[in-house]
Amino acid sequence: MTKIVRMAKKQDKEGIKKLWSEVFVEDSESFVEWFYENRYNRAFSTCLEVDGEIVSAMQGYPFNLRIRGRIVQASILAGVSTYEKHRGKGFMSMVFKSHMEQIRDAGIPLVPHTPANTPTFFSKGHYPVTETKIVSIDAKNYESKAQIFPLKEVKSEYGNMFACYTKWSLPYSGIVARTMSDFTLKMADYCADDTRVSILYRDDNVAAYGVFYELPEYIYVEEIAYDSSDSLTDMLKSIATLGKEVRAKLPTDSVVNIEGATSKTKLQGVMGVANMSAFLKAMFPYIPKDYEDACIEVVDRIVDTNNGVYKLDGSVGNEKPHITIEAGRLAQVLCGFKTLDEQLAENNVVVHDKNVFDKLNNLLPKEKCFIIDEY
């Protein structure tokens, strides 16, 4: 058996698409066709070939994240798949390591994604950086000023919706910092399926919108943006009048004022670091005063080149470190999902200098972490 792990070639596209379709059977044919015509990029696709057949693959798609107000390049991971008959052979781990190195070589520091089973990636050093609150609302004939449209029929409103998304997304860390082009392409993702949108207007501006799918047993609201809790509540009421339970994906700080609504919080996105030096440089283009000497030792069992001792600006040196931490655990702290104190309580950081540790802990407080985009 001959195994080759490599970046995808031009002729691999159909084989990788076939693998996606057979593994992710819940995805519609129309979405898969759309994805491979508009999102697929072989420069960000990694595959494993066995005797001439693609049996394992994953793909990335580049965009920018906003983390603590800074813009950081990332490549979202999608289509992590292996044919069932080849599972348990270590193929996915081989592809994963190669993909992280491929993304690093492309000059991109971060790899966020939403796994089907989040703990699966802990062994790869990819840990949670965002949470999601799923709000459930019973079907009922509420009064609402929001209007419902097929999403593909309101393209003229995308600019107005984008303005709502941009303002709404600003407080969150780890979220996609979309351009208008990014937003339009994301709406096209949704339009590949039979998707609708509820829009609440105020003075001709979009005060809230919710993009949703009607599933056999309930309605799932995949993307929501809003200017206030009242706007969010009114918009969701319009969807609840359609006769099915509504399940809405929201940030944990959202407030829905609907009697009987229930919620549960779950881990959403994880993140890996393809280039720690570039990540730190993006977060700290200059070292804050009184932190010039702070040194962090990073350990990484997947991306070998991440191992080293770093200053906050991403420069690598030979100084004695003040703390030692795994790359993925440091990513949690930099994103604001966890503090260094929390990592210490969970034995995820080794402290060599408590004074510097305390200063770094104060520099990096918790943030509100959320992301919509997933594949």
Image: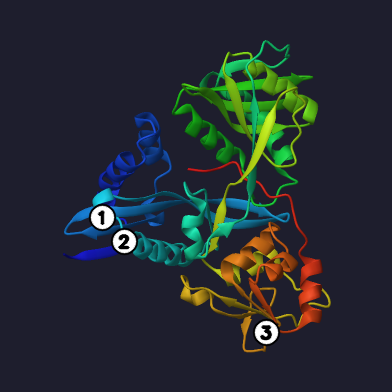
Q: Which mark is residue 321?
A: 3
Q: Of marks 3 and 1, which one's residue comes earlier in the chain? A: 1
Please tell me the numbered disc located at residue 91: 2
Left or right, 319 with respect to 154, comes to right
Q: Amino acid at mark 3?
A: Pro
CA separation, marks 2 and 3? Answer: 35 Å
Disc 2 or 3, which lies upstream in sequence? 2
Out of 362 and 159, give the one closest to the viewer. Answer: 362
Which residue is labeled 1 in the image?
Answer: 86
Q: Secondary structure at mark 3?
A: loop
User: Which is nearer the eye, 320 or 316?
Assistant: 320
Q: Does 65 appear above or below 34?
A: below
Q: Determine the CA span between mark 3 and mark 1.
A: 42 Å
Mark 2 is on which residue type?
Phe
Mark 1 vs 2: CB contact within 8 A? yes
Residue density around tag 3, few if under 14, some if 14–19, many if 20 or more, within 10 Å: many
